[in-house]
Amino acid sequence: MSIQAQVPPALAALHNFIMDHDPHDIEEYLAGDDTDFDPIPGQRNDFGGLADGAVTQIEKARATVLRDHIAEKMWEDYQTILTARENL
C-alpha cells in the first residue's frame, strides 16, 4: 500500500517534467493523425467524449437505475459470499 500511495505523485511529477521539457511532444507523436486514439477507427464513438450540454433528466434517471442495479447485484454477490463462508 505504501508503494501505491506514491504512484499518483510520481505520475504528476512525470507529467510536469514532460510539460516543462517538451509540451508539444504529443503533436509530434500523432503527426496530425488523431485516429491513433480512436479505439474503432471510422466508426462514431462517444467513448471518452464530453457532453454537449447539461445532463438531461432522462439521462440522469437512466444512470440512477443503472447504478442501483449494479449496487443491488454487488450486494447479492456479497450476501452469497457471506453465506458460503458460513457454510465452510
Image: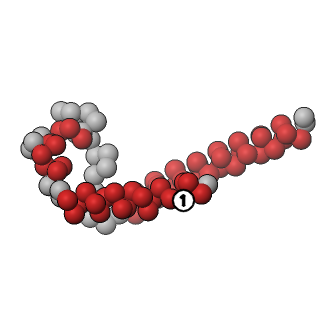
Identify the residue at horizontal 17%, vertical 56% (top origin). Answer: 22
Question: Looking at the image, is 1 positioned above or below residue 28?
Answer: below
Identify the residue at horizontal 22%, vertical 63% (top origin). Answer: 20
The front one of 63 and 42 is: 42
The residue labelled by disc 1 is 5
Residue 14 lies, in percent from the top left, at 34, 57
Is residue 46 at least partly visible in the picture? yes
Question: Looking at the image, is 38 positioned above or below residue 60?
Answer: above
The front one of 65 and 82 is: 82
Which quadrant of the figure has residue 11? bottom left
- Asked whether, in this view, residue 34 is left or right of residue 81, the answer is left
Total number of numbered labels?
1
Identify the residue at horizontal 18%, vertical 33% (top origin). Answer: 42
Residue extending farthest left: 32
Residue 9 lies, in percent from the top left, at 44, 62
Residue extending farthest bottom: 54
- Asked whether, in this view, residue 30 is left or right of residue 85, the answer is left
Amino acid carrying label 1: it is Ala
- Asked whether, in this view, residue 65 is left or right of residue 25, the answer is right
